[in-house]
Each structure stands twice: as C-alpha cells, then as structure tokens.
Image (cartoon, rainbow, N blue to C red):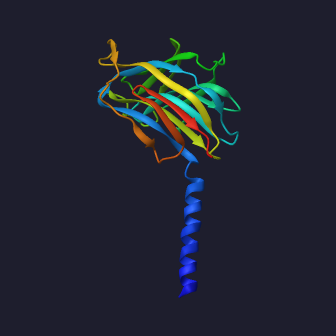
Amino acid sequence: MKKVYLSVLSAIIALFFTTTASAATGEGGVKLLTDTNYYGIQGYFTVPSDVFVSNDGSYIAFYLGLGDVCEGGISYTPSEKWKKFLNCGKQNPASNKSMPLASQPAAGEQIHIKLVNNLNDTASLYINGVESYTLPVQNSGSLKAPTKVKMVHTTQDNQDKNRYKNAAFSNVQVQTSKGGPYTTFPTNITPTFPFPSGKGDYEVIRSNPLATTLKAGK
C-alpha cells in the first residue's frame, strides 16, 4: 500500500513540474475584439524596448484584424528583425505576405497601421500611410461584408525566453461605413487574456487600447 501511495505521489509531483515548466512555451497573447462589425481599423503602434526573441522559430507580433479572416501589422524575429505582414490565409501563399521594414524602427518609435476591408474578398494593409499589400482571402466569400475588428499582442515562444517592455497601441479607430470616417475604438470592451491558451507571461499595462510588457520565464 505504501508503494502504491508513493507511486501516485511521485506521479503527481512529476506532472506538476512538467506542467509548470512548459506552461509559458507556445503561442499566447492578449486580444481586444469588438462586438460590432466595422469596415476597417487603424492606429499607432509604439515599438517596445528590451526586445529579445529566441532564434528558433519564435516571434512577437502586434497586429490589427478583420475578425479572424485577415490580420495585418508588425512582427519581430531575430533573422528578419521588424517586418510588416498581412495574413488572409496561411495555406495560400497569395493570401499571406511579409517583408522586413526598409528602415528598422527604434524603441519608442511610432508606426501607423491601417487595415481595410475592401468588401470584395480582399484586404489592404497600410504602413505609415503607404499601401503595403492588397491580398485576396484564402476562403472565397469570407470578406464581402463588414466584420468584427480587433487589436492583438501575441508571441510564439518556444523556450519561454521572449521578452519586451512597453509595446502599445494608441489612438485606435474603427471605420463605421465603406469609405467613411474613422471613430474611436469602442471603450466598453475588455481584453481576452490570456489568448489563445494561456502562454506567455504578459503584464497588461493598459487594457484599451492595448499596452503590454512580456516577461521571460524565471
């Protein structure tokens, strides 16, 4: 009986340490998603300081989204540094493009990001007022009407070592009609956190618009 008890106790202890050791590896982040449909979203992104990302496929990314159909913004990897991207479907190369920024930004620098739903199964990404991409969606018919929009801070952290300080969206606005004016992002929305599955040690500095710090594992 004592051996059985010790075996069960050992299994519980092993499970505990396995869970805590791996809890902050993988994909995770913080998301703000509207309840109402809009035609576009734009805002300023402040580049964080003290950035470290493991050189193993890990990344950090900060983006705006048209529901889950198209997501566009800025990401960082050690190999390509800061780059712009628009993803309207990972399975179709024509729907997913990225490129390193021609001028690498410094910590604290602001970048204007705008993502527009063209209502014809394409979306357009603008960086600092210049069109970067207009791409078709992977799934036909998924972007012919306005969608909920979102702002997201996320990470893929394969070693629990990614970190940064003070990444922030500001002056985020939504477009209420096709080709119409932009108004302030709804203030009555709180973040989905952690998202999607609790990975990453995030400190939410401001919930709306999003401002976060990501801490490396202890």
Classify 32 as above or below 218. above
Front-lying residue, 65 or 69: 65
Residue 62: horizontal and vertical position, in percent?
Answer: 52, 29
Q: How many numbered marks have been drawn onto this rendered protein structure? A: 0
Classify 210 as above or below 161. above
Residue 14: horizontal and vertical position, in percent?
Answer: 59, 67
Q: Quadrant of residue 155?
A: top right
**Point 54% across, 43% down: residue:** 200
Q: Residue furthest front?
A: 2
**Point 39% across, 35% down: residue:** 191
Front-lying residue, 175 or 6: 6
Q: Quadrant of residue 165?
A: top right
Asked if one can make out residue 89 in the rendered structure from this viewpoint, the answer is no
104 with respect to 122 (left or right): right
Asked if one can make out residue 98 in the rendered structure from this viewpoint, the answer is yes
**Point 50% across, 36% down: residue:** 203
Residue 206: horizontal and vertical position, in percent?
Answer: 43, 28
Classify 70 as above or below 176. below
Residue 161: horizontal and vertical position, in percent?
Answer: 65, 42
Q: Quadrant of residue 82?
A: top right
